[in-house]
Image (cartoon, rainbow, N blue to C red):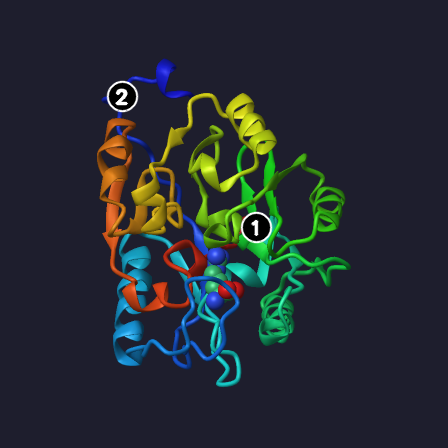
Amino acid sequence: MPPATRDLRTPRAARPRRYLMCPPAHFKVTYSINPWMDPDKPVDLPLALAQWEVLRDRYRALGHTVELLDPRPDLPDMVFAANGATVIDGRVLGARFAHPERAAEAEVHRDWFRAHDFTTVREPDHINEGEGDFAVTDSYVLAGRGFRSSPLSHDEAQEFFGRPVIGLDLVDPRYYHLDTALCVLDDRADEIMYYPPAFSPGSRAVLARLFPGALIAKEADAAALGLNAVSDGRNVLIPQGAVGLFDPLRARGYEPIAMDLGELLKGGGSVKCCTQELRP
Ligand code: ARG
């Protein structure tokens, strides 16, 4: 429901979710495929693990199910599990990564789904980085392109899921995945928050038309990766630096929960990147 027609004092309702995560047991920054990654900056691995465990435990404490993927020593970005597939209506569209460094992750994800009774698992024809570039609202699948996922993957996703896919052009390399610039807050009501300067003028106009009630993020909150958040319909787990979003979220009835994933930020990811949602 757009905020104008909603009683702001009514608390939002969370819906129990099922998430797929991968512990950062072998996380490191040895290559640079986005501007956040600097292989010369040391990563504190025990701290990265501890921060990730807080996120996993918080999901479970909120009543969500967290499934785990086995990390592989040769795939240091596997902690960013959102990129490995997109699951809607129990149908799995596998990933195909843009960079060779991450290519092998796609098969690890597909194997996991096959081993966990997902019967429809597609190996994609075109490059798509899973939920990094696909965001699911009630009416649409929003799809990023420009840095990673191919525009051709958008048609492939539309045909596979049978949902309208809206292509959005990302233009700022810091916001190289859609989930660094846009977050779905209420997936039953088409409510989102996003950072307009990450998008081309035409894509901004499309977003303004489709989501007139969206929460618009400011530069500082986007730069703290504040859009890389996960909402269960009520609780919004959000990078702790995005303080400017907390009050606007509360004003809409959401409960912001600040998360410190500072070590993973060195890989260019935060809450949402670590979390793939398995939609029944
Ligand atoms: N280092 C990873 C990459 O550049 C980070 C991925 C972040 N994931 C995301 N869903 N935005 O591919």
Quarter of the picture holding the N terminus? top left
Which is more toward the observer, 231 or 245? 245
Which is more toward the observer, 275 or 132? 132
Total labels: the figure holds 2
Q: Is mark 1 within 8 Å of ligand 1?
A: no
How much space separates mark 1 and mark 2, taking CA atoms? Answer: 30 Å
Residue in the picture at 39% in, 75% down: 24
Q: Is residue 230 above or below residue 203?
A: below
Dot 2: few (<14), some (14–19), or many (≥20) neighbours within 10 Å?
some
Residue in the picture at 40% in, 72% down: 38
| SS for callout 1 | loop
Left or right, 220 with reference to 209: left
Q: Is residue 123 above or below residue 168?
A: below
Question: x%, y% of residue 119?
Answer: 69, 60
Amino acid residing under circle 1: Asp
Mark positioned earlier in the residue sequence (1 or 2): 2
Pointer 1 residue: 133
| SS for callout 2 | loop
Residue 242 shows in this picture:
yes
Among the 4 quarters of the image, the one containing residue 214: top left
Residue in the picture at 24% in, 52% down: 240
Question: x%, y% of residue 153?
Answer: 71, 51
Q: Is residue 265 above or below residue 135?
A: below
Q: Residue furthest top?
A: 5
Q: Residue furthest bottom?
A: 73
Residue in the picture at 51% in, 53% down: 173
Question: x%, y% of residue 142?
Answer: 58, 39
Amino acid residing under circle 2: Leu
Residue 186 shows in this picture:
no
Pointer 2 residue: 8
